[in-house]
Amino acid sequence: MNIPQHVAIILDGNGRWAKKKGMPRNYGHIQGAKNLEVIIEESHNLGIKYLTVYAFSTENWNRPKEEVDGLMKLLRNYMKTCLKTATKNRMSVRVIGDKSRLDEDIQKRIVELENLTRDYEGIHLQIAINYGGRDEIRRCIRTLADKVNTGELLSEEITEDVISNHLDTSGIPDPDLLIRTCNELRISNFLLWQLAYSELYFTEVAWPDFDKSELMKAIESFNGRSRKYGGVEEQ
Ligand code: FPP
């Protein structure tokens, strides 16, 4: 079995999953966070090296205040409990997105978690929080423009690699496989630059029900494909 090196996941359907059970949306998010723990462990066991998950988008601030508060509470707690999972799986954690809009205590916990897990090589988890692909590219362009203005960089030196190295995912290989759960067939502003050649996998299963067997189905589907880059098949 060919295991993708980098899997990215849009964790969708927590709300619908909870509604079906007659429960509030935030209950779905709590179960979604629990399921992330399961999938991290399974990914690590399978030998996936990079896992990137979409936890909170730049657009998610527009949700009802109660739901946003619930998600922030969940993320705040997760930054604490995640250290246990990180130690167990020798997992490094990086948060991608614009962290400056998050509450200061959450920012502080993110820095702590990133620093404490920096050297772990078992699996690399990227959590996208207040993340939008367009916003990431906008921030990258501003950084590059500043460097050109100060003379640190010449505009003709801006290559695709230079851009990749100024994104939040700098140093991380592009995803081989993108999974989106709960029957939505969109990219929704996730990793717009990085997904250029990724294989896409969509499933009807809602995120809280996406278990090991569903992950295996996604990897089997990935295995059945011949990857092409600009019409050229992978050797
Ligand atoms: C999409 O479901 C999910 C989100 C907006 C949040 C994802 C968050 C988690 C899984 C939990 C927190 C994550 C971490 C890292 C602790 P939805 O609410 O859009 O569901 P719906 O489409 O059915 O309404």
Image (cartoon, rainbow, N blue to C red):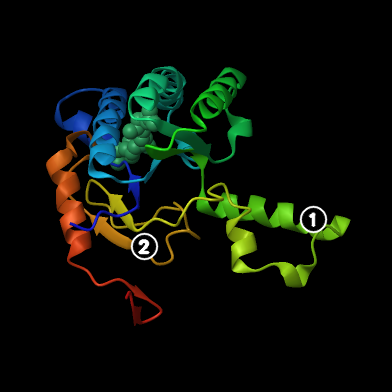
For residue 147, the mark is: 1
Q: Position of residue 43 (x, y in %)?
A: 27, 40
The amino acid at mark 1 is Lys
The amino acid at mark 2 is Ser
Q: Position of residue 13 (x, y in %)?
A: 26, 39
Q: Residue at x 22, y 51 (%)?
A: 183
Q: Position of residue 231 (x, y in %)?
A: 36, 82
- 180 on left or right of 211: right
111 over 203 or under it: above or below = above
User: What is the quadrant of the C terminus in the image?
Assistant: bottom left
Q: Extreme left residue here?
A: 213
Q: Quadrant of ligand 1?
A: top left
Q: Position of residue 38 (x, y in %)?
A: 24, 31
For residue 198, the mark is: 2
**Front position in the image: 132 or 173:** 173
Judged from the image, the secondary structure of the residue bearing numbered disc 2 is: loop
Q: Extreme bottom residue here?
A: 231
Q: Residue at x 29, y 57 (%)?
A: 185
Quadrant of residue 151 within the rendered picture: bottom right
